[in-house]
Image (cartoon, rainbow, N blue to C red):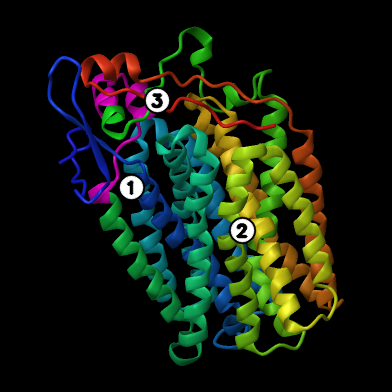
Amino acid sequence: MDETTGTSIPHTTHQTSRETPYGGPVVRVRSGAWVIACCWFAITVDGYDLIVYGTVVPALIGGEWALTPAQAGQIGSLALVGMMIGALLAGVLTDRMGRRRLMIACVAWFTVGMALSAVSPSPEIFGVTRLASGIGLGGLMPTAIAMTLEYAKPKLRSTANAIMFSGYSIGGIIASLSAMWILGAAGWRAMFWIGVGLGTVLLVVVAAALPESVTFLVGRGRHGEAAALAAKYGIAVPQPLAGDVQRTGVRALLDRRFAVSTVLFWLVVANGLLLVYGLNTWLAQIMREAGYPLGTALAFLLALNAGAILGTPLLGLLADRIGSRIVVGSMFFGAAAAILLLMFRFPTPVLLTLVAVAGACTIGTQTLLTAFIGGFYPERLRAAGLGWALGIGRIGAIAGPLYGGLILSTGWGFQANFLAFAVPALLAAILVLLIRGRGHADTASVASVGKEQFGVENTEQGSVQHR
């Protein structure tokens, strides 16, 4: 039993033991990998819920409801409107509820939303249920990122975040493979029932095993609990700051130290999310318009997410080595090039490879961007910085399905869609290069508290660099 959270922690988690210098009780230091694994599972289910819509779009356009591309784009955007609301709410509620309780609430919320989507009798009600699900999904994502960055080793935060966020693409692959096998036989509603099952399992795991945020405990003045939890996981305890430096929320994000970078982050995230959700919503249908059968068109969607899974951890390691700014900017340039090349009718294996590269350079780069943002701000602003960036950035996510549907409706040919999606990739690359500064680290060592009270040394101090 975890005394600081009241939750049960499985004893299979890797632990090491150290004795106190005063002959006190042995402290068992758990690996933060368990927390990251919980967040990975959460993002996997999150990714499934979001990408599953792209897999059922062909069925909604050509089947039960006979939607037009414009109507399908509008419904796709509703979930992303909900995500914008959820992400902004997360930035406010995380300091009141705590990250653990907020994540549990978000998982329960979107699981119920997926069940309601599965039984929707009309496109209008279906759209409302997608909007409601999006609120939970939007609150979950910044919370999972903040927890991952908090419990990861400081020198490997970009890598840990990249591995955690690979769950998004794994969720997409699960959705794509499920659609190949189930969509034709059981219909599009079965795809949402699969999501309900995944969400239910996730809810049990998170409620039983996820610890609270040390930063939240410090902010609430529960310093003893924070020190005990930090010692248990071998992480640092952030020190409360005095005076006006203690400000949190959007006012602090827009003060003179952070204002320019904050606005640039919002614009970059908006362009990146337009790419991620626009391509995940429309890629299968675009390839259908290009003459490919449904199975092959879904294979392109699978390749998009497989490329992100393979590329994201490697990009995370590179970002930890040479800096996030250089890697993120270069990958957005790479995304623009790969998407432009999809305009040409290369052999299918070549196109699948290009789509995989585009996946690594869009979904994967968006993952690194969140680590860049999370590491740029001090600990006290991390959740707010991520929440507001992902919240404001959802404007781009909302625009993605609408943008793709609009271009597809013009009848200009499938090449026009790829040209249209290359533009925001290029713009994002330029904006990343304009970001300057390293942010401010205010995380202090746990050594002075943990060493005296619990006999644990923290030897992993450091911060993420953004060259």
Looking at the image, is 101 positioned above or below residue 229? below
> Which residues lie in the magenta part?
207-228
Q: CA distance from mark 1 to mark 3?
A: 20 Å
Do the residues bearing badges 3 and 2 touch, measured as CB atoms within 8 Å?
Answer: no
Numbered label tally = 3
Task: Depth check: give the residue in front, 315 or 40.
Answer: 315
**Helix, strand or loop at mark 1:** helix
Identified by mark 2, the residue type is Gly
Q: Is residue 398 visible to the viewer in this orientation of the structure? A: no
Q: Which residue is mark 3?
A: 459
Q: Position of residue 214 (x, y in %)?
A: 34, 29
Whole-percent x and y of residue 369?
63, 44
Q: In the image, is 5 to the left or to the right of 123?
A: left
* Residue at mark 2: 311
Give the mark nearer the N terminus: 1 vs 3.
1
Give residue 202's position: percent from left, percent from top: 33, 59
What amino acid type should be assigned to the residue bearing mark 3? Thr
Q: Is residue 214 magenta?
A: yes
Say which of 57 and 327 sits in front. Answer: 327
Which quadrant of the rendered structure holds the C terminus? top right
Residue 262 position by quadrant: top right
Overall secondary structure of the magenta stretch? helix
Circles 1 and 3, Cβ within 8 Å, touching? The answer is no
Residue 359 horizontal side relative to residue 433, left or right: left
In the picture of the structure, the residue carrying the numbered disc 1 is 34
Residue 391 pos. (x, y %): 58, 43
- Label 2, secondary structure: give it: helix
